[in-house]
């Protein structure tokens, strides 16, 4: 894009508060942007910032013609005065490269409509399966978790690829029986090693989208990341499984960059 039309995509990221994991994720995203030639813009706000200050930061990115994608790093601090849903809705749908705006999620859920952007983690899950020649159409897919960030959009996207989708959540009776019926199992529940080998059908394909920090006295940092699925037990049963870390995480970053590039292409196509 830079060589052909003299334009460069831009990504704006807003970080609120000092959560170490959120700060780390933002650094990874900024580094990835610079690696591929996307210009990063960041605004960091204190945890006690007002909702008006956060809206102003989003508005400035919405209106900046050099910024084509806008994300608010989630989760936001658990402050009573910050309404996460309202803030996500304030991001322009045309710049919502995270894919969380109600317009984009609604279009994802409706047949015959196309969202401007698909949530990056869900998109990475599908991309991973398709690039490894995994058949989705007609398969039994069990999604463990129904979060608005991963579980719900993944279920919707799997249905778009004509899978038969079952969602397991906190009120599901006998979840082990449900997961044992899966040809493809996707997990994002945030509980380390919750899914054990006896939860799985032999030959299942496992996409572990959990990233849980646990104590590890052997690590220099004193902690390490593990998934929702007990890897050592699952690898005996599964025909394929994603590791944590190093599985869907890097692909999710790639999907964010891809969405940002698509946003820039749409902008300059209409100028």
Image (cartoon, rainbow, N blue to C red):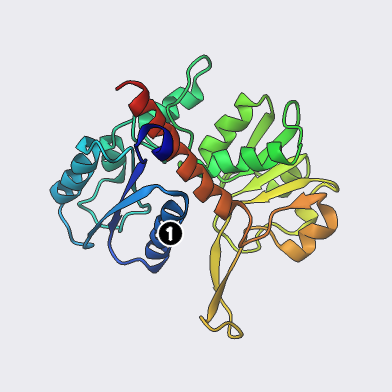
Q: Position of residue 246 (x, y in %)?
A: 62, 60
Total marks placed: 1
In the current view of this chain or complex, which residue is farthest to the top? 112
Left or right position of 237 against 77: right
Residue 17 in which image quadrant: bottom left
Q: Secondary structure at mark 1?
A: helix
Q: Is residue 239 above or below residue 236?
A: above
Front residue of this view, candidates 62 and 99: 62
Q: Position of residue 176 (x, y in %)?
A: 73, 49
The residue located at (62%, 27%) in the rendering is 159
Q: What residue is pinned by disc 1?
A: 31
The residue located at (61%, 85%) in the rendering is 218
Front residue of this view, candidates 255 and 35: 35
- Kindly tell me whether residue 174 is visible in this rendering: no
Q: Is residue 32 above or below residue 125?
A: below
Front residue of this view, candidates 29 and 195: 29
In the current view of this chain or complex, which residue is farthest to the front? 3
Q: Position of residue 264 (x, y in %)?
A: 37, 33
Left or right position of 77 against 22: left
The residue located at (34%, 28%) in the rendering is 267
Q: Quadrant of the C terminus?
A: top left
The residue located at (23%, 50%) in the rendering is 82
- Kindly tell me whether residue 235 is visible in this rendering: yes
Within-10-Å neighbours for mark 1: few <14, some 14–19, many 20+: few
Q: Is residue 138 above or below residue 152?
A: above
Q: Quadrant of the N terminus?
A: top left
Residue 15 in which image quadrant: bottom left
Q: Position of residue 178 (x, y in %)?
A: 72, 42
Left or right position of 178 against 257: right
């Amino acid at each position: 894009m830079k060589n052909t039309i003299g334009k460069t995509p831009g990504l704006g990221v807003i970080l609120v508060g000092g959560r170490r994991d959120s700060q780390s994720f933002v650094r990874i995203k900024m580094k990835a942007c610079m690696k591929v030639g996307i210009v990063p813009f960041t605004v960091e706000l204190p945890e006690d910032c007002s909702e008006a200050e956060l809206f102003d930061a989003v508005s400035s990115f919405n209106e900046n013609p050099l910024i084509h994608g806008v994300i608010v790093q989630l989760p936001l601090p658990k402050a009573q005065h910050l309404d996460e849903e309202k803030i996500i809705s304030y991001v322009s749908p045309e710049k919502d490269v995270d894919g969380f705006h109600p317009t984009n999620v609604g279009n994802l859920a409706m047949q015959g409509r196309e969202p401007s952007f698909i949530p990056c983690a869900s998109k990475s899950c599908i991309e991973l399966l398709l690039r490894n020649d995994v058949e989705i159409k007609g398969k039994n897919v069990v999604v463990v978790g129904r979060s608005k960030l991963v579980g719900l959009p993944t279920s919707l996207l799997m249905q778009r690829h004509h899978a038969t989708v079952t969602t397991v959540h906190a009120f599901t009776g006998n979840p082990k029986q449900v997961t044992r019926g899966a040809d493809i199992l996707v997990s994002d529940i945030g509980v380390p090693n919750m899914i054990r080998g006896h939860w799985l059908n032999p030959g299942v394909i496992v996409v572990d989208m959990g990233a849980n920090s646990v104590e590890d006295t052997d690590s220099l940092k004193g902690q390490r990341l593990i998934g929702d699925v007990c890897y050592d037990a699952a690898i005996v049963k599964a025909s394929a499984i994603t590791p944590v870390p190093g599985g869907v995480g890097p692909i999710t970053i790639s999907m964010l960059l891809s969405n940002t590039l698509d946003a820039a292409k749409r902008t300059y196509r209409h100028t």
